[in-house]
Image (spheres, coloured by chain):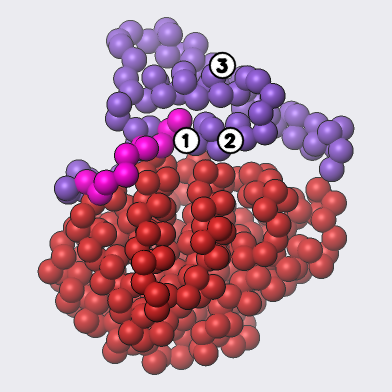
Chain colours: A purple, B red
């Protein structure tokens, strides 16, 4: 696809998602209380969107990843939460 | 347009979904053994489940002209109890000769614990001893990168395991390259919020090529779409991919991998 074709296909969807992210951050700011590890990771991940790189999706996923290498002693539960506990 | 659904948990779907899939061009659906949403209390629960996968689901699928195949294992969410896992793994060989069984799956890791790793190793051993294909579940969200690396280490360290007979499912942008570099197949799962979207899956395809990659819905008891694969095929056409290229990804690739099992026949 050309860049024009990419924009024609995906601009409106991406615009919608960007507004959703902005609204989410506004909602967080209106709510009382401290950030937790998820929001800290989210703010770092947002920074990965700027610049001219071609691997933003990968960089965002890495920001939200547990980078440790050893197995844990025991599974604390079943689910995942979306960001590593820092 | 014909396609194969390589990963769908049909025990948790209504019969209408089989009809919809058949109408959309599905020719075969493959169902790995997974977590039911609760922990089964005894090995007998797994015996009944394996019976359901090998007897009941194929009949349900056949009503709509669909072939149904399955994979067997104890899933990683129930792998913290190693004793239970040993008893379940001992049951699996009793089912391996059933005509719709493709191999061992979906094995893998969930929270990357020591017991999960031990049970993964036990099931890799089972697959090696019985010369079975392997389908791997990689963990969710923040656990995926670490889990994929741990899983690849286990598989690469066992010389009996041929990489081309392993599919590592639920890859994303940060794990796909290491899977393909290991010579294994990589599955992209089209599942809302927690895994790939059609657009991202196609980005991965366009970056890494269309060899050893497949698409699947992994539809289950959560909010998910059994038609995610044909919808992504449509997305491929929107991007200008020709029909043959689409069919390669949604039909020929799964057929090539799954055809390595003597039981996979359309």
Cα separation, mark 2 vs mark 1, equals 9 Å
Chain of the residue where label 1 is placed in the rendered structure? A
* A71 in the magenta segment: yes
Dot 1 crowding, Cα within 10 Å, few <14, some 14–19, many 20+ = some
Chain of the residue where label 3 is placed in the rendered structure? A
Cα separation, mark 1 vs mark 3, equals 21 Å
- Which mark, by number, is residue A62? 1
The image quarter containing residue B150 is bottom left
Q: Percent x, y for residue B215?
A: 61, 60
Q: Nearer the viewer, residue B15 or B212?
A: B212
Question: At numbered mark 2, what does the secondary structure look like: helix, strand or loop?
Answer: helix
Can residue B177 be seen at all in this image of the molecule?
Answer: yes
The residue tagged 2 is: A57
Q: Which of disc 2 and disc 3 is earlier in sequence? A: 3
Dot 2 crowding, Cα within 10 Å, few <14, some 14–19, many 20+ = some
The image quarter containing residue B39 is bottom left
| Residue at the (62%, 35%) spot, across then down | A55
Q: Percent x, y for residue B22?
A: 64, 72
| In the rendered image, the vertical position of residue B208 relative to residue A55, given as above or below | below
| Residue at the (84%, 43%) spot, across then down | A1
Q: Percent x, y for residue B8?
A: 49, 65
Badge 2 and badge 1 in a common chain: yes
């Amino acid at each position: 696809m050309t860049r024009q074709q990419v924009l024609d296909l995906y601009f409106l969807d991406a615009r919608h998602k960007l507004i959703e992210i902005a609204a989410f951050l506004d909602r967080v700011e209106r709510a009382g209380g401290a950030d937790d590890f998820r929001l800290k990771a989210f703010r770092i991940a947002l920074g990965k969107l700027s610049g001219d790189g071609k691997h933003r999706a990968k960089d965002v996923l890495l920001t939200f990843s547990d980078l440790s290498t050893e197995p844990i002693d025991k599974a604390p539960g079943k689910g995942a939460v979306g960001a590593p506990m820092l | 347009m014909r396609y194969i659904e390589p990963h769908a948990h049909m025990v948790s779907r209504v019969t209408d979904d089989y009809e919809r899939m058949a109408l959309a061009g599905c020719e075969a659906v493959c169902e790995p053994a997974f977590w039911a949403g609760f922990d089964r209390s005894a090995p007998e629960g797994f015996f009944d489940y394996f019976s359901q996968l090998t007897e009941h689901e194929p009949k349900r699928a056949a009503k709509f002209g669909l072939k149904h195949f399955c994979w067997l294992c104890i899933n990683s969410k129930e792998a913290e109890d190693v004793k239970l896992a040993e008893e379940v793994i001992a049951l699996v060989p009793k089912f391996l000769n059933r005509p719709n069984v493709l191999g061992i799956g979906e094995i893998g890791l969930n929270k990357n614990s020591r017991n999960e790793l031990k049970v993964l190793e036990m099931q890799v051993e089972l697959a090696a001893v019985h010369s079975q294909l392997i389908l791997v579940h990689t963990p969710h969200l923040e656990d995926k990168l670490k889990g994929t690396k741990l899983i690849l280490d286990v598989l690469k360290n066992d010389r009996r395991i041929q990489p081309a007979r392993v599919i590592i499912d639920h890859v994303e942008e940060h794990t796909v390259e290491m899977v393909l570099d290991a010579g294994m197949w990589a599955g992209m799962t089209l599942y809302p919020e927690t895994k790939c979207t059609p657009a991202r899956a196609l980005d991965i395809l366009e970056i890494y090529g269309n060899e050893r990659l497949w698409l699947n819905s992994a539809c289950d008891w959560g909010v998910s779409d059994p038609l995610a694969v044909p919808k992504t095929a449509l997305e491929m056409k929107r991007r200008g991919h020709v029909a043959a290229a689409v069919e390669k990804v949604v039909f020929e690739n799964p057929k090539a991998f799954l055809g390595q099992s003597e039981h996979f026949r359309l």
